Amino acid sequence: MADSEQVNVLLYGLGAIGSFYAFILSRCDRVKLTVVARSNYDAVVKNGVSIDSKNHGKHTFRPDHVIRTPSDASDQHFDYIVCAHKAVDPYGAILPLDPVVNENSTIVILQNGVGNEDPFRARWAKVTIISGVVWVGASQPSPGVIYHTGSEHTELGLFPNAVLNDTALEESRLNTLTSLLLSGGTHLSTFADIQPRRWEKVIWNVAWNAITTLTDQDVASWLSSSPDAIPYTRRLMNEVIFVAEASGVAVKDGLADALIAKAQGLGELRTSMQADREAGREMEVEVILGVPVKKGRELGVDTPCLEGLYVLLQAVNGRIRARAI
């Protein structure tokens, strides 16, 4: 794709993280941006999206098109379909994308968890998939209003497609996406193998998301809550590291201690899973905890700390689902 060509992008999932990337993409002149909004549809149609960012200042922007469902744009071709929706139903949530996905599509996955690529590959064998790890702090205190902290970095890499078998084409699609995001003014890195980065993020999320959700404490309060808190967290992280290594994923030496030290420097860190529970929203338990638990069982890796958290969070999630019915 030539540098001057217009790029049609569909952003699926206009929550806090999706809105942040919509903001970045809206700042690139080449992008024609369509967003799929659900609970905040009316607010975004009426007022646009307002973002208050420590890095970028205060802005209000309007996507080119705001729709309620991908089927509303079934007559269009999108070069990139950016998926920033919550991965609470990994297979079911992507079914509405059927009308807009074709063999020339590039799907960009910006979600927490591991194994996120599998539902997309199972449904659309020939598409290009770019897998992303998001280190962005954002919240949506009211519909269409986004608050962004100073945390901002994106890690991208291809999820190789043996069916397509065209590395040059897939790399060109990755390069085009990175050029758009860089033009929008955000920070990113690309990796030949994105899976170690995905596992590092899930090791982070397994600890902080699960623990803050179950204890109703920020990370700093948890770590100082007792002499056992840091050793427990280290054991928990190391269990997930052992599962990653047994799966053939290379993990950096000393990662658990490095992540604990990083969290200690962030102050009163609250997490997205904690926010979901407080708001009565279903949580991303399966892709963050369930996949590592099941891989551990499959590979014979004991994960007692992880399994305990997984069982407890399934119970909390079940109660949230029951209340929503």
Image (tube, rainbow, N blue to C red):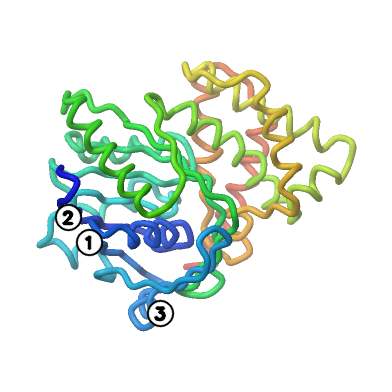
Which mark is nearer the camera, 2 or 3?
Answer: 2
Quadrant placement of the N terminus: top left
- Give the left or right position of residue 169, taking residue 212 as reference: left
Q: Which residue is mark 1?
A: 32
Amino acid type at image mark 1? Lys
Q: Residue at x 31, y 49 (%)?
A: 180
Packing grade of label 2 (10 A; few <14, some 14-19, many >=20) is: few
| Alpha carbons under labels 3 and 1: distance apart | 21 Å
| Image vertical order of residue 307 relative to residue 186, above or below | above
Packing grade of label 1 (10 A; few <14, some 14-19, many >=20) is: some
Contact (CB < 8 A) between labels 2 and 1?
Answer: yes
- Can you tell which quarter of the image residue 54 is in? bottom right
Give the label on residue 136, or none. none
Task: Return the residue nearer the eye: 93 or 161.
Answer: 161
Can residue 59 be seen in the rendering of this structure?
yes
In the structure shown, which secondary structural element does the residue marked by tag 2 occupy?
loop
Amino acid type at image mark 3? Ala
Give the label on residue 43, or none. 3
Disc nearer the start of the sequence (2/3): 2
Task: Return the residue nearer the eye: 199 or 48.
Answer: 48
